Amino acid sequence: MKTYKNCQSCSMPMKRDENGGGTEADGTRSAKFCSHCYVGGHFTMPDVTAPQMQALVRDKMVAMGFPKFLCGFFTHGIPKLERWSATR
Ligand SMILES: [Zn+2]
């Protein structure tokens, strides 16, 4: 199975996921999505759009004390991730 360095929903590095990734419906580890985005085979925010996800992640990073330019850089690629490109 293909493994991803970053969550394909919010682009968080999988290494930084304290749970090691999201979970599928059968309880196995998701290699694609982090535990914040994907639990038990479902997205935690099923109706969120790519721009909304960008804003959410950016706000979260700013709250965590990251410099603004870094937050913009980090969230820039979110619309290109698999979750968002597959639905189009
Ligand atoms: Zn995620």
Image (cartoon, helix red, strand yellow):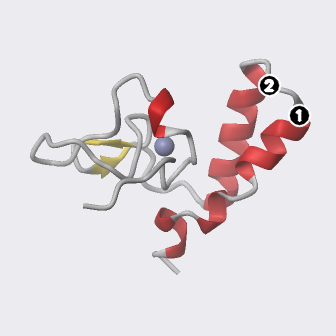
Q: Which quarter shows the N terminus?
A: bottom left
- Judged from the image, the secondary structure of the residue bearing numbered disc 1 is helix
| Residue in view at x 72 percent, y 29 percent | 61
Residue 27 screen position, x and y as percent: 13, 40
Residues at discs 1 and 2 in contact (Cβ within 8 Å): yes
Is 72 displayed left or right of 40 in the figure?
A: right
Asked if disc 1 is less than 8 Å from ligand 1, the answer is: no
Judged from the image, the secondary structure of the residue bearing numbered disc 2 is loop
Residue 70: percent from left, percent from top:
83, 38
Residue type indicated by callout 1: Lys
Residue under the image location 43 percent in, 42 percent down: 37
Left/right placement of residue 30 relative to residue 43 reads left
Mark 2 Cα within 10 Å, few/some/many (few <14, many 20+)? few
Residue 85, horizontal then vertical, whole percent = 54, 74
In this figure, which residue is indicated by the disc labeled 2? 66
In the rendering, which numbered label is found on residue 81? none
Image coords of residue 66 (percent x, y):
80, 25
The answer to whether the residue bearing label 2 lies less than 8 angstroms from the nearest atom of ligand 1 is no
Q: CA distance from mark 1 to mark 2?
A: 6 Å
Q: Which residue is mark 1?
A: 68
Residue at 64% across / 57% down in the picture? Answer: 78
Q: Nearer the viewer, residue 3 or 35?
A: 3
| Amino acid at circle 2 | Phe
Q: Is residue 77 above or below residue 55?
A: below
Find residue 39 and report its image quarter.
Answer: top left
Neighbour tally class for label 1: few under 14, some 14-19, many 20 plus, Cα within 10 Å: few
